[in-house]
Image: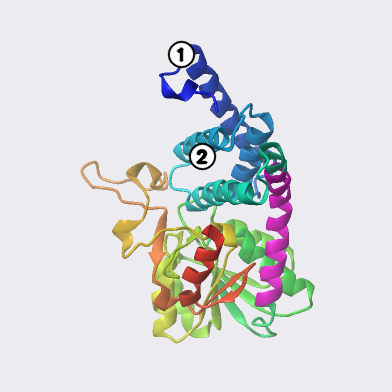
């Protein structure tokens, strides 16, 4: 291996590295802009795969150093995205595992590229698997409450409707995030002919009596089987448990994150990640505004998780995480 890493890099080398990682971010942005429905983790893995293709690394260690720096840059410009962080970590871990199966560096690199290119397709297939698993829990006459604009949840409900099932959906407003609002989900489901009711976030307890099940997505599934998801998920789960309604989570396995929050203060979210208040609210100047993007729902409030790895109880998540990151 070259010994160039032992000393400090020249300014030209540092500039090249910076340009290389800027290109990773630009490629990530290009993917996400071209297909806004692509999950952040999938876009990140496609961008990292592009980096591997362009890399001049001669050893696995050099490649791993490049990937770590690229992952750090992606996470720095997408602060608070747990699924993106988990996707980056899984991809880096896969590179390390592949080196044991393919001791030859070039063969290892080629295998990593193939795997990375297949990841987007695997993600789509994973959502189909999840839809099939949830399908048996959705029957005619059911009333389902959803929160936010989860691609997986919408896919599950559209799949059930396409199979001829007749059910209705209650969608929470999901303020203040315009990109993940319930209004977008309500529009998609209504356009598919599914009866939809739209409610304020504060109306959840009022409608829960007529709800048969709650179905939510996840920004991240953590080690104890709880989830980090759009703000308001926790209070919905509390109300559902009080009224003995099941809470189901639909999430791809690349959202499994090696995190172990015990309460809301343990969430990896900074003040910069918080959402701005809606512009129509006039807040007095001396009033402190807190508007977090996500909250943590402990495992005791979750009935089952539907993933591309199968149907899991919250207590089974830690075992699957060990397998994923082993």
- Residue 58's image quarter? top right
Q: Which secondary structure dominates the residues rendered in magenta?
A: helix
**Part of the protein shown in magenta:** 111-134
Instruction: Report if residue 2 is visible in the image.
Output: yes
Decide: marks 2, 1 in contact (CB < 8 A)?
A: no
Label 1's element? loop
Between 157 and 105, the one lying in front of the other is 105
Mark 2 or 1, closer to the camera: 1
Looking at the image, residue 172 sits to the left or right of residue 163; the answer is left
Residue farthest along the right direction in this orientation: 163
Between 96 and 45, the one lying in front of the other is 96
- Residue 168's image quarter? bottom right
Magenta-drawn stretch contains 27: no
Label 2's element? helix
Query: Which residue is disc 1 drawn over?
Result: 10
Q: Earlier in the sequence, mark 2 or mark 1?
A: 1
Between 72 and 161, the one lying in front of the other is 72
Query: Which residue is disc 2 drawn over?
Result: 71
Looking at the image, residue 74 sits to the left or right of residue 35; the answer is left
Between 93 and 18, the one lying in front of the other is 93
- Residue 228's image quarter? bottom left
Cα separation between marks 2 and 1: 22 Å
Which x, y percent locates residue 262?
32, 65
Q: Residue at x 53, y 48 (%)?
A: 84
């Amino acid at each position: 291996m070259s010994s160039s890493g032992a000393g400090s890099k020249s300014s030209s080398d540092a500039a090249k590295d910076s340009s290389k990682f800027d290109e990773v971010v630009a490629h990530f942005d290009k993917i996400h802009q071209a297909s806004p429905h692509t999950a952040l983790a999938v876009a990140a893995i496609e961008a990292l795969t592009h980096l591997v293709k362009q890399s001049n690394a001669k050893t696995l260690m050099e490649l791993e150093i490049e990937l770590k720096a690229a992952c750090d840059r992606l996470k720095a410009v997408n602060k608070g995205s747990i699924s993106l962080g988990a996707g980056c970590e899984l991809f880096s871990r896969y590179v390390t595992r592949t080196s044991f199966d393919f001791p030859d560096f070039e063969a290892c690199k080629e295998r990593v590229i193939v795997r990375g290119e297949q990841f987007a397709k695997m993600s789509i297939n994973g959502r189909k698997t999840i839809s099939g698993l949830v399908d048996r829990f959705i029957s005619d006459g059911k009333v389902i409450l959803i929160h936010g604009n989860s691609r997986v949840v919408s896919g599950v409900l559209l799949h059930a409707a396409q199979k001829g099932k007749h059910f209705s959906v209650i969608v929470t407003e999901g303020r203040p995030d315009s990109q993940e609002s319930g209004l977008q989900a309500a529009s998609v489901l209504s356009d598919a002919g599914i009866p939809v009711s739209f409610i304020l976030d504060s109306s959840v307890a009022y409608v829960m009596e007529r709800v048969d099940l709650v179905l939510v997505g996840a920004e991240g599934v953590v080690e104890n089987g709880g989830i980090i998801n759009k703000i308001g998920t926790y209070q919905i789960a509390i109300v559902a448990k009080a009224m003995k309604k099941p809470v189901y989570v639909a999430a791809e396995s690349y959202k499994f994150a090696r995190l172990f929050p015990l309460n809301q203060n343990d969430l990896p979210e900074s003040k910069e990640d918080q959402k701005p208040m809606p512009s129509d609210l006039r807040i007095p100047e001396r009033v402190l505004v807190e508007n977090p993007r996500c909250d943590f729902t402990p495992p005791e409030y979750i009935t089952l998780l539907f993933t591309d790895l199968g149907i899991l109880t919250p207590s089974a998540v830690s075992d699957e995480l060990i397998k994923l990151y082993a």
